[in-house]
Image (cartoon, helix red, strand yellow):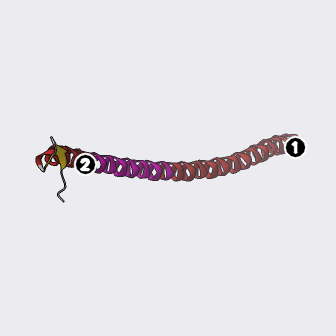
């Protein structure tokens, strides 16, 4: 028994060849399409991974930069407190100096 369909009561290989070739061609086209889609998916996965990595890097850089600014702000606040203390000391010393000048001027009269 052959692998062909009966045509007018006679089996023919040619009756199978055309649909078989069409099916093979469609299978090849689908395989190529699957390959393209898999490449596209891999490319997108790589892009997504790169984006995640870059966002993480930017995020960690932002965090480090923020911490750096917070430390600098803290340092400047401490310096400001010292400046306020120094200004207060300076004002007190000016008052004492003026009082001493008055005392000296009274003693020298």
Residue 60 in picture, x, y percent from top left: 53, 53
Placement of 93 over or under 2, stated as above or below: above
User: Left or right: where does residue 27 sit relative to residue 56?
Assistant: left
Q: Name the residue under label 1.
A: 103
Looking at the image, the residue that sits furthest to the bottom is 1
Judge from the rendering whether residue 60 lies leftward or rightward of residue 105; answer left or right: left
For this rendering, which residue is in front, 84 or 56? 56
Q: What element carries label 2?
A: helix
The residue singled out by tag 2 in the image is 27
First in sequence: mark 2 vs mark 1: 2
Q: Which-is-in-front pick, marks 2 and 1? A: 2
- Whether 34 is among the magenta residues is yes
Whether residue 17 sits left or right of residue 54 in the image: it is: left
From mark 2 to mark 1, how far is it between C-alphas? Answer: 112 Å
Q: Residue at x 65, y 51 (%)?
A: 75
Q: Main secondary structure of the magenta part?
A: helix
Of residues 60 and 15, the one nearer the viewer is: 15
Q: What stretch is highlighted in magenta?
A: 31-56
Membership of 74 in magenta stretch: no
């Amino acid at each position: 028994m052959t692998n062909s369909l009966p045509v007018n009561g006679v089996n023919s290989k040619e009756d199978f060849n055309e649909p078989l070739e069409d099916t093979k061609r469609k299978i090849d086209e689908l395989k190529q399409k699957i390959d393209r889609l898999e490449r596209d998916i891999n490319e997108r996965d790589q892009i997504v991974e790169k984006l995640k990595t870059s966002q993480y890097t930017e995020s960690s850089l932002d965090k480090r930069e923020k911490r750096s600014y917070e430390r600098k702000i803290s340092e400047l606040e401490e310096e400001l407190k010292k400046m306020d203390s120094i200004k207060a000391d300076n004002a007190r010393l000016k008052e004492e100096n003026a009082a001493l000048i008055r005392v000296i001027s009274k003693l020298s009269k």
